Amino acid sequence: MDWQLHWLEAEGDLSPWREQITMEVTATYATVAGLIKRPRLDVLVQRGSMVIPEIGMVGQAYRKGLFALTLDPDNPHFAVSLGDGTLRRQVTHEVHHCLRMGGPGYGRTLGEALVSEGLAGHFTRRLFDNPPEPWECAVTNEVLDVHRPDKKTLSVARYNHAEWFFGAGDRRPRWLGYTLGYRIVGEWLAMTSEVDADLLVNVAAETVLAAASAAQVRVSHS
């Protein structure tokens, strides 16, 4: 397997779950291989409490060949997430980020970040046929429409990522960015035929944003 697991255990032991974690990551590797050329990756696996509370784990991509997987066995949802496919989808989401970082990049503007997150979500859905994750359907369409950024805001590089994606402060709801990105990519997909895995990784953010904007215009005129 071209994914090397590195176990960081100075701050917590994962040995009781190491075999199952390895099996889940290996199964994800095989699934990804059925859709796209597998990248070579280093995967940091660590125990910690800074996770998504609803699933007891979280992934974070650093660059094209490295991402981390943080797991919290003390979280009440961890055991279920370890075996119900959640771990595989977390890994796949981060693998997409690594693939995109090795291509056009995650992006620096708000619009680029929205597209990268939405693409990772739909890439995962392409592999597992799963419904949207909780963070990908966290707010209603009405709330999305209220907070949908204009073209100028989408192009801002010094945006507040924590505010848009995690709800930091009190201006925007939690997970707004993930849900909005998932919707924007969904609008692009609805207007685009023959989208293969390579395009889901490497499509330019401007292409996706333009298609989503066109879809909004159609809706407003219908």
Image: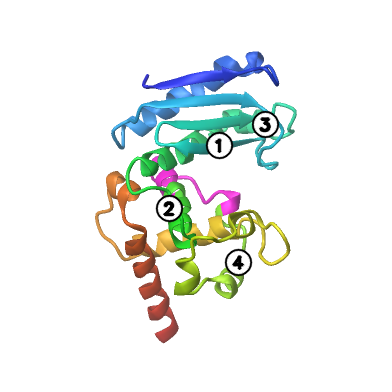
Labels 4 and 3: the sequence-earlier one: 3
Residue 194 x, y percent position in the rendering: 24, 54
Labels 4 and 1: the sequence-earlier one: 1
In the shown orientation, is residue 190 left or right of residue 150? left
Q: Quadrant of the C terminus?
A: bottom left
Quadrant hosting residue 97: top left
Reading the image, the residue beneath label 4 is 140
- Find residue 59 and name its label: 1
Magenta segment's dominant SS is helix
Q: Quadrant of the N terminus?
A: top left
The answer to whether one can see residue 62 in this image is: yes
The amino acid pointed to by label 4 is Thr
Labels 3 and 2: the sequence-earlier one: 3
The amino acid pointed to by label 3 is Phe
In the shown orientation, is residue 39 left or right of residue 160? left
Reading the image, the residue beneath label 3 is 78
Q: Residues within 10 Å of mark 3 (few under 14, many from 20)?
A: some
